[in-house]
């Protein structure tokens, strides 16, 4: 009816259209005519049909309701009969008719259950007829009333059947534990019946229950006989022992099918008089049977256990895999077996237990030795697979080949017969593996000695792992195979240039600068350690000549042209030499007025250099100019301060404290025509190391940096190390690295952890002492205190040799050569978790320097200058003021950071924007960089304060809105598709997430549960994926969700398996 009412307006409109057609005498088709009158009559037809169906349903309802009442009347009769039957149980107490009464009780229970189910059906039908439900609670009352009668007769019937079976069944056929359990259940059930009110108030029935209970109680003392003699652990020895104790002929009855409880209780045996002796023997049999079962079970479990072997690469042999489960099972079974040996009931199986324990111990020992051999074999096999190594180590190679043959034969036999119990239970195999382990240890020692001789020939090999060094030595015929490892030997050399005749003619920096060698080196005529030593010497000689040549050209051509023409290291180093020379000449000629005039020249040179950055430059030249500006700004500020302070002499401390470069004759080699550079600071003088530095940015020199440089240079002069200390992000490590660049020394940075031992440190110190390199041990105080004490002795040994001006010395029982320019620096974060206090003997070897608060403004100013900003000074102050005010006024959150790393990220972003938009307002560039780097991480309440700070520092300026166009449309589409609210704040967060992803390698979404972090990520993913193919700027995004707390570190990142000698990638490298 409701649908018809809703359709009526449309029917009326349709009929009106037909009337209009009739007005114009439009003749209808027969089908249209029929359809017209069907539509007109449809309402009446449907109403008539509804009325007819309603009448039919009313009649049917009456009929079915009458049927229901008839069924209920029949139900009442059946229920009344059932109640009568229940009442009859009050008069049933003939215990001889227990079985019949039990059957009757079960039948009544079945009737009650059916009546209960039928009552539920009746109530459901009454609900359907919309009448009040009949109360059938009486059924439940009767069920509860009958429950005690049912329990009594059911349990009595079951008890008598069990009792009869126990008396007549042979002990061989009885399950004693089931009988004991059943008897106990019967006793509890009958005892409950005795307490039931209906039975308690019926004297006759109560006597039946009491009689059954007494029968059970009378039988209970006989249960030990059943449980002992029917025990499946009873063996011939137990029956003999029992016969002897009781002086009865029982052992012959052990397997007699007619020997039952009735016989046992007969006058002939009267075993009820000897229950204690029977129980004792039965318990013994049960305990021994447990041991027997455990041994059988263990043997059965080992039958199907096999070794898993897998073909190993292209070696045509195999390796052992998946032994963890075998070892776990071995450990469990060995513990079980050893526990059996302490059992008082082990007697009959003592030898079997000993043999089984010996077998398991042998298998465990074989597998342990096997895995030891496998680890060593897997490590050494690829090494001795190289013909070059075999040629250089013939003795070790011969020994390894012997083990290799044993390994291949053993693995082939294991593949054919992999059963653990058969194959590993072999004393001869254990002896072979032990001998193989000894031989491989000898091979390993010979290999280590061989590597040490190579390292002694070329000390920088100490900074390579054994595997990397062996990779080089195993490919000596291919001189180019050393290329991937060059960067670890020479900090700034990415690769060497080989000509067609395999002559080395030049070196390449990581940035692509080609620096030619003075003379070509032929690596084919000598071993790798010797020609790499020649590369080191040639690097230093070529660099020395090129530096001297570039200095000669510095005064003869325009500075900007000289910068473009010269190599990066020449530009940075020789400009410092020239600056030192010109300042001292100006001071000597005209004192303070002289340097005032020179200051004008420096300012002009500086302006020309900055102008270069704003123009089009080659990539390498741009890097060199950026680094040069950093040095020039510091030099300019230094001379400005000297003019302001009225410095008149080159001996004034204000000049002497600067890092100065002098070109001097080579006093150590008078015959050498080439001058050498000496780097001086206060009283310290250090020879320039001529280590190729390539093209790299230089650290901004602030007063803090200068103080650190002075401390470290003084430490070098006193043959001590340096120890910068301070919180993270203050430039400790970078300052040490920059000082190494200033004096052209190789600086190896090593991140320390508590897993370092004194042997690893000794290897490192050998490399430093022999190569003359510097080392910077980051977070040095994370090393264990026990190791630090030994390290103090090692460092002291090196320092004493330098002070004594020795050319060689004994270090860790080995004589090594000494390069006195080596040095060790350590950096520390005092007060951090997991850090230790340095021992006093170690503290005395290092000059401490505190690095707490960097000069953010000066650093920002100089870096902005190097990126080509004109207003660098003003912009740097605004940026530092922004961070200062944010730290003071904004809320304190764990993810807020206003330190050096945050400052640098803003500067780098601003530099990239300056390069992209060179003509744009510089304040707008910095404003955009500040907003892009900070706005996404601020909370909503802090954003208002941040906008206020920005508007105060950049009045009249506002950040230009980024146009997202297609991406905005796609994001809104995804929000609608996911049925999310189109909140402006959420859309803004999605685009902030996109912006941060464009400039960061990784990021962290921080916020409360339900804040929309995951949803924002998913919306951005779907929006970018939807734009794939429309424009080349967008691609399909794959999102992998990991829970790092649910897996181990090895599973997350990957780990090395010492057994299979394979690296297994973790989740992160697999999905990235």
Image (cartoon, rainbow, N blue to C red):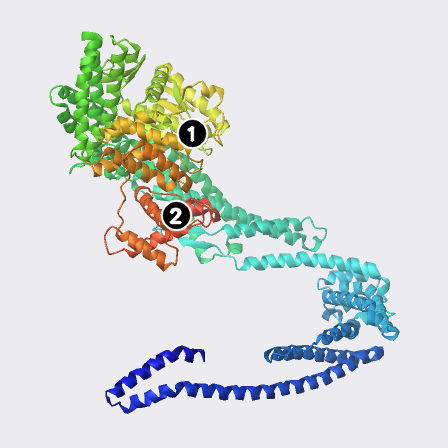
Q: Residue 358: x percent and y percent?
A: 59, 49
Q: Residue 228: x percent and y percent?
A: 76, 62
Earlier residue among tags 1 and 2: 1
State the image quarter where residue 648 is shown: top left
Element under disc 2: helix
Q: Residue at x 29, y 33 (%)?
A: 955
Element under disc 1: loop
Say if 572 sits above or below 754 in the image.
Answer: above
Asked whether the viewer can see residue 1036, the reply is no
Q: Is residue 616 left or right of residue 690?
A: left
Q: Residues within 10 Å of mark 2 (few under 14, many from 20)?
A: some
Task: Give the camera-side residue of 698 and 938.
Answer: 938
Say if 622 sits above or below 417 in the image.
Answer: above
Which residue corresponds to mark 1?
Answer: 779
**Which label belongs to residue 1068?**
2
Q: Residue furthest front?
A: 23
């Amino acid at each position: 009816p409701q649908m018809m009412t809703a359709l009526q307006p449309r029917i009326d409109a349709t009929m009106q259209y037909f009337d209009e057609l009739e007005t114009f005498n439009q003749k209808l088709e027969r089908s249209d005519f029929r359809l017209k009158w069907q539509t007109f009559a449809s309402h009446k037809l449907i109403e008539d049909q509804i009325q007819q169906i309603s009448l039919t349903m009313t009649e049917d309802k009456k009929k079915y309701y009458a049927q229901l009442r008839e069924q209920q009347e029949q139900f009442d009769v059946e229920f009344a009969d059932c109640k009568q039957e229940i009442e009859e149980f009050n008069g049933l107490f003939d215990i001889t008719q227990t079985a019949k009464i039990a059957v009757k009780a079960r039948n009544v229970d079945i009737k009650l259950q059916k009546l209960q189910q039928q009552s539920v059906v009746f109530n459901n039908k009454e609900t359907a007829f919309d009448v009040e439900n009949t109360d059938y609670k009486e059924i439940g009352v009767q069920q509860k009333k009958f429950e005690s009668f049912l329990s009594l007769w059911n349990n009595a019937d079951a008890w008598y059947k069990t009792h009869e079976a126990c008396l007549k069944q042979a002990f061989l056929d009885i399950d004693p534990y089931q009988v004991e359990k059943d008897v106990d259940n019967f006793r509890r059930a009958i005892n409950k019946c005795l307490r039931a009110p209906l039975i308690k108030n019926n004297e006759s029935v109560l006597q039946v229950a009491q009689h059954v209970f007494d029968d059970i109680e009378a039988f209970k003392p006989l249960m030990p006989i059943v449980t002992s003699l029917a025990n499946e652990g009873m063996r011939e020895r137990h029956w003999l022992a029992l016969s002897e104790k009781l002086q009865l002929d029982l052992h012959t009855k052990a397997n007699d099918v007619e020997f039952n409880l009735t016989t046992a209780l007969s006058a002939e045996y009267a075993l009820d008089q000897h229950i204690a002796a029977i129980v004792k023997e039965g318990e013994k049999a049960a305990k021994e049977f447990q041991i027997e079962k455990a041994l059988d079970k263990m043997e059965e479990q080992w039958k199907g256990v096999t070794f898993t072997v897998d073909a190993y690469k292209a070696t045509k042999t195999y390796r052992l895999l998946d032994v963890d489960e075998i070892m776990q099972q071995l450990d469990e079974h060995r513990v079980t077996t050893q526990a059996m040996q302490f059992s008082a009931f082990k007697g009959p199986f003592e030898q079997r237990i000993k043999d089984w324990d010996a077998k398991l111990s042998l298998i465990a020992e074989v597998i342990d030795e096997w895995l030891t051999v496998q680890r060593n074999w897997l490590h050494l096999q690829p090494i001795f697979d190289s013909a070059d190594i075999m040629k250089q180590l013939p003795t070790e190679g011969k020994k390894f080949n012997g083990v290799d043959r044993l390994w291949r034969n053993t693995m082939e036999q294991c593949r054919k017969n992999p059963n653990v119990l058969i194959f590993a239970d072999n004393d001869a195999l254990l002896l072979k593996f032990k001998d193989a382990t000894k031989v491989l240890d000898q091979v390993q020692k010979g290999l280590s000695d061989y590597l040490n001789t190579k390292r002694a020939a070329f000390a920088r090999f100490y900074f390579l792992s054994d595997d990397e060094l062996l990779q080089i030595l195993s490919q000596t015929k291919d001189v180019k195979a050393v290329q991937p490892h060059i960067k670890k030997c020479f900090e700034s050399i990415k690769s060497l240039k080989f000509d067609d005749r395999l002559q080395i003619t030049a070196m390449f920096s990581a940035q692509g600068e080609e620096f030619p060698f003075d003379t070509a080196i032929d690596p084919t005529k000598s071993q790798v350690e010797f020609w790499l030593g020649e590369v080191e010497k040639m690097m230093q000689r070529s660099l020395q000549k090129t530096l001297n040549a570039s200095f000669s050209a510095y005064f003869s051509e325009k500075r900007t042209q000289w910068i473009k023409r010269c190599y990066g290291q020449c530009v940075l180093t020789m400009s410092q030499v020239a600056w030192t020379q010109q300042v001292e000449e100006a001071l000597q000629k005209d004192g303070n007025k002289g340097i005032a005039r020179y200051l004008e020249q420096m300012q002009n040179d500086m302006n020309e250099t900055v102008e270069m950055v704003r123009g089009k430059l080659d990539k390498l030249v741009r890097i060199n100019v950026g680094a040069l500006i950093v040095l020039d700004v510091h030099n300019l500020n230094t001379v400005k301060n000297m003019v302001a302070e009225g410095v008149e002499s080159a001996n004034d401390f204000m000049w002497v404290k600067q890092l100065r470069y002098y070109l001097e004759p080579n006093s150590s080699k008078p015959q050498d025509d080439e001058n050498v550079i000496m780097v001086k600071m206060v009283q310290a003088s250090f020879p320039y190391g001529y280590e190729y530095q390539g093209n790299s940015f230089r650290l901004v020199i602030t007063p803090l940096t200068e103080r650190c440089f002075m401390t470290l240079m003084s430490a070098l002069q006193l043959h001590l190390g340096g120890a910068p200390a301070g919180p993270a992000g203050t430039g400790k490590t970078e300052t040490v690295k920059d000082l190494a660049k200033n004096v052209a020394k190789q600086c190896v940075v090593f991140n320390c952890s508590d897993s370092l031992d004194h042997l690893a440190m000794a290897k490192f110190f050998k490399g430093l002492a022999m190569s003359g390199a510097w080392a910077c041990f980051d977070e040095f105080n994370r090393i264990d205190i026990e190791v630090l004490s030994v390290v103090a002795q090692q460092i002291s040994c090196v320092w004493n040799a330098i002070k004594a001006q020795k050319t060689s010395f004994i270090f860790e029982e080995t004589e090594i050569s000494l390069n006195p320019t080596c040095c060790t620096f350590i950096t520390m974060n005092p007060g951090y978790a997991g850090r230790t206090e340095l021992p006093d003997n170690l503290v005395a070897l290092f000059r401490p320097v505190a690095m707490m608060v960097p000069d953010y403004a000066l650093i920002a100013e100089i870096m902005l200058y190097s990126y080509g900003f004109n207003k660098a000074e003003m912009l740097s102050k605004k940026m530092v003021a922004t961070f200062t005010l944010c730290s003071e006024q904004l809320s304190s959150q764990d993810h807020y950071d206003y330190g050096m790393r945050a400052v640098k990220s803003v500067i780098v972003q601003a530099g990239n924007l300056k390069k992209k938009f060179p003509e744009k307002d510089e304040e707008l560039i910095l404003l955009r960089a500040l907003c892009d780097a900070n706005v996404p991480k601020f909370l909503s309440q802090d954003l208002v304060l941040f906008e206020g700070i920005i508007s105060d520092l950049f009045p009249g300026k506002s950040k230009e809105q980024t146009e997202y166009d297609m991406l905005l449309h796609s994001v809104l589409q995804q929000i609608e598709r996911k049925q999310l609210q189109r909140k402006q704040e959420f859309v803004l967060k999605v685009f902030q997430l996109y912006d941060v992803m464009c400039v960061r390698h990784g990021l962290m979404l921080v916020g409360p549960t339900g804040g929309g972090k995951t949803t924002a990520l998913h919306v951005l993913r779907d929006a970018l994926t939807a734009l794939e193919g429309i424009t080349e700027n967008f691609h399909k995004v794959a999102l992998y969700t990991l829970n790092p707390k649910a897996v181990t570190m090895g599973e997350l990142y990957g780990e090395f398996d010492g057994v299979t000698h394979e690296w297994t990638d973790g989740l992160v490298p697999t999905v990235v």
